[in-house]
Amino acid sequence: MIKQSKNDRRRIGIDARFYGSIGKGLGRYTQETVDQVIRLDPHNDYVIFLRSENWEDFKINQSNVKKVLADVAWYGLAEQIVMPYLIAKEKLDLIHFPHFNVPLLCQTAFVVTIHDLILFHYPTQRASTLSPVLYWLKNYAYRQIINRAVKKAKKIITVSEFTKQDLITSLLIPADKIKVIYEGVASLQSSETVNYSKVLEKYGITEPYWLYVGNAYPHKNLETLIKVFADFCKIESEAKLVLVGKEDYFYKRLKASASEMQLWHDQPVTNNSVIFAGFVPDAVLAYLYKHAEAYVFPSLYEGFGLPPLEAMSMGTPVLSSERSSLPEILDTAAMYFNPKQPQTILKAMLDLYKDQFLREKMIKLGRERIKKFNWIDSGAETLKVYKQVL
């Protein structure tokens, strides 16, 4: 290896305001990218921008890494004004934005990761609590920011070939400007200190249960899943559907739908066929994955699809929508259905439930498939992008 001289050192920034659990899926991507890149590269200097909520979550003792407090909310006006100032102050050679929200006034050379173009393909007011006029203005602003980000970026990272092709087709981005780098799969571990019987009792979870992990935005298609599950319960009355995701406006709206179908009530929880578990720590999530009949993913649009891979890593069979990036990412390791045709979802659930041989086959295929995705490779490929740009 050629030793890098001090004069050859570059200052690379990473906008890590999503770092950790506060950023949900983006938080995991940001955390793993930051952790892997700085571990692999002692030759350049890194500036990591964090919020007060995740300042303590990022622990590092490398002399070439500096933490900068950027206590600026995502997507707001302050992001457009304050972030360019903080970035310019650090005199960076390059900065990586792990999401599309690149400040319009940023003058530093940058790399951006585009996970999907959902704002272009599913612009619906149902995905917002805003009035129609405000929603239209917000969506228009987001589209302009994304357009500017992909046009001005030195390099674009996407997490799937599907998203790369979407950028080429929808925004006319040259193919050679885009690098596909798959995400990794988190290593979830259960804990001996957790009383899981108490956890299950708290939520009213009994086996058999089917699992979904993620948010409840309209494109996730969870209302369809609940309707399908109502039909499944007519065949298997003891079954449960467990939905894991932090409660917000969209989950509350979903609860109302489940309540109308007599599948969910406030009390007693033991009578619920659909269970809203809210946010759960990773140790509990690992347990829920392991003991589920299957993970069900009815999404209409995904740029990558990390939860079904997490399910596979825990030995859980996966039933998935056949849309967008999912066949690319999951390959033959999932059973597919048409998310717009509820009867195909129900058939997939019944086929897996009745056939133990099929279940074991899907578990085996899943364990093989996840070997393709790891954060070490993802970090190494990301670092290559930085070096290529510099």
Image: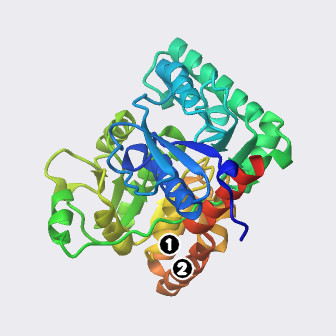
x and y, in percent, of residue 96 in the image: 61, 43
Residue 92's mark? none
x and y, in percent, of residue 214 in the image: 43, 51
102 and 356: which one is in front?
102
Labels 1 & 2 near each other (Cβ < 8 A): yes
| Figure check: 245 above or below 104 | below
263 and 204: which one is in front?
204
| Residue at the front extreme, as displayed | 6
Which of the marked residues, 1 or 2, is nearer the chain's N terminus? 1
Q: Can residue 118 be seen in this view?
A: yes
| Figure check: 232 above or below 157 | below
374 and 370: which one is in front?
374
Indicate the amino acid at tag 2: Arg
Residue neighbourhood size for the residue with mark 2, other residues' Cα within 10 Å, grouped as few (<14), some (14–19), many (≥20): some
| Residue at the top extreme, as displayed | 133
Q: Is mark 1 on a helix, strand or loop?
A: helix
Q: Which residue is drawn at 50% across and 39% down?
A: 218
Alpha carbon of mark 1 to alpha carbon of mark 2: how far?
Answer: 6 Å
| Figure check: 125 above or below 4 | above
Indicate the amino acid at tag 1: Met
x and y, in percent, of residue 171 in the image: 79, 34
| Figure check: 355 above or below 81 | below
Residue neighbourhood size for the residue with mark 1, other residues' Cα within 10 Å, grouped as few (<14), some (14–19), many (≥20): many
Q: Mark 2 points at which residue?
A: 367
| Left/right of residue 3 with respect to residue 217 in the rendered view | right
Q: Mark 1 points at which residue?
A: 312
> Which scheme is used to colour this image of the protein?
rainbow
Q: Residue at x 61, y 52 (%)?
A: 44
User: On the rendered image, what quadrant is the N terminus found in?
Assistant: bottom right
